[in-house]
Amino acid sequence: MKARLSPLLLALALAGAPLARAAELPAALADTLPDAHEAVAVIDADPGVRRAQGEREAALARASGRRRGSHEWIAGGQWLDRDAGAQGRFNEWEASLQRELRLPGKAAVDRRIADAEESVGGDLLADARHMAAIGLLEAWLEWLAAEELRRVSMAAVADADSDLDAVAARLKGGDAALVEHDAALAAAAAARREVRLAEIRAQEARITLQARYPGLPLPAQAAPIAAPSVPEPGWRHWGERIVAVSHEVTLAQGRAELEANRAERARLDRRANPTIGLRALSERGGDESALGVFFSVPLGTGARRAVAAEAAGQAMAAEADADAVRIEVGRHAQALAARAETLAAAWTLAKEGLDAQRQETARLERGRELGGVALAPLLAARRREREAAMAEVESRAAAYGATARLLLDAHAFWINDDGHSGEGHGAAAAP
């Protein structure tokens, strides 16, 4: 009977609460995945996440500057020593203070641009955490699968050595032929070769984990991968939740909104901002003085019109990109849910095949002990059992990985927000 996820997790999912913040990891996940707090720590230490944090800080600073505006007061002045010939020399000076003024409506658009920049920065960070979490999940499961395949290969070596010892004893007693001894030797060598290959894969997987996630402690003995679970209330529900919380969607939407606001700002900039100022001057040593107001307005429109048209085109492209992302995320969610369900069913078949093969091998072993079965059928059965055991491990790892990826993309663990805040991160307390 297939395991089910906890009712608490289901209730929180249906209520729309941030799952990782309120619920513990499902037991099937917690038994296989690393400690949640340790996982979140190495996710936040990932270079891609740290880069996104820097980009988010830059976006916040850029947004703050956008709200304040770049229109500053400009002070100017000059001093002159005028030589008026027979009239003598005069000290003269001029001082001015001026500022460019944003026309009505531009400040409001600038605030919307600032809000969009902050939103995009938050979604960039959240998406980077998501990608780092996916990388950790894949690397961790690859290591567990490689270690389990290594154990399967080592068990096959033990069986091959046992068969070789038995054949050697029979050969010594005259009850076995040399050809059987040769077959047993070949089987033992093949089994040892499989161990070497499995060790290489396990070593590479461990090196990858240690290199990419140096802060993540690895157990001395890798735990076996748990059997895939059926997440309540069903595969389709989690696929739909992926779309609802996807940072890819909110990031693309945020970029489209940002470009739309920039296009609106460029349209408003076709009417140039005026500059007003106050000017004071003194001439002929103070005999003449003046105080006045001045203003200036750029009159060119062709370049501004081109800039506005370019920004409008960029906004159109960003909106198309957002539509493409929504389509792709929806496709990915449906495909992932279907894949998880199908791989779980495939693992069931692989497990049934392994059980049947083990039964066949056990019967041939008993027949061999009674002297009614030759060595060749037993060696062939052991080879099929080893292949079936490896296929079961690979199938279980693939099915578990697809289910875990489905829940991870739905923010059920390691990612602590609803896909829209760009702020939350964390994990449930590990059991």
Image: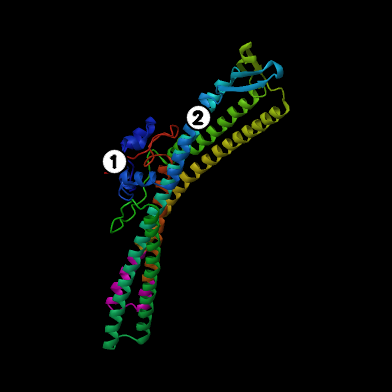
Up/down of 5 relative to 107, above or below: below
CB of mark 2 within 8 Å of CB of mark 1?
no
Q: List x then y, in percent, for residue 191.
A: 37, 72
Residue under numbered circle 1: 429
Up/down of 136 relative to 318, above or below: below
How crowded is the residue under tag 1: few (<14 C-alpha within 10 Å), some, or many (20+)? some
The image quarter in which residue 355 lies: bottom left
Q: Which three-letter amino acid code belongs to the residue tagged 2?
A: Ala
* Disc 2 secondary structure class: helix
Q: Is residue 287 left or right of residue 143?
A: right
Q: Is residue 361 magenta?
A: yes
Q: Is residue 344 visible?
A: no
Instruction: Mark 2 or mark 1: name the one nearer the start of the chain.
Output: 2
Q: Which residues are magenta?
A: 357-380
The image quarter in which residue 221 lies: bottom left
Residue at 53% in and 42% down: 331
Q: List x then y, in percent, for residue 216.
A: 33, 51
Q: Is residue 410 left or right of residue 286?
A: left
Residue under numbered circle 2: 63
Q: List x then y, in percent, for residue 379.
A: 37, 74
- Most common SS among magenta residues: helix
Residue farthest to the front, as pictured: 86
Q: Which mark is residue 294?
A: none
Residue at 32% in and 56% down: 224
* Disc 1 secondary structure class: loop
Q: Is residue 305 magenta?
A: no
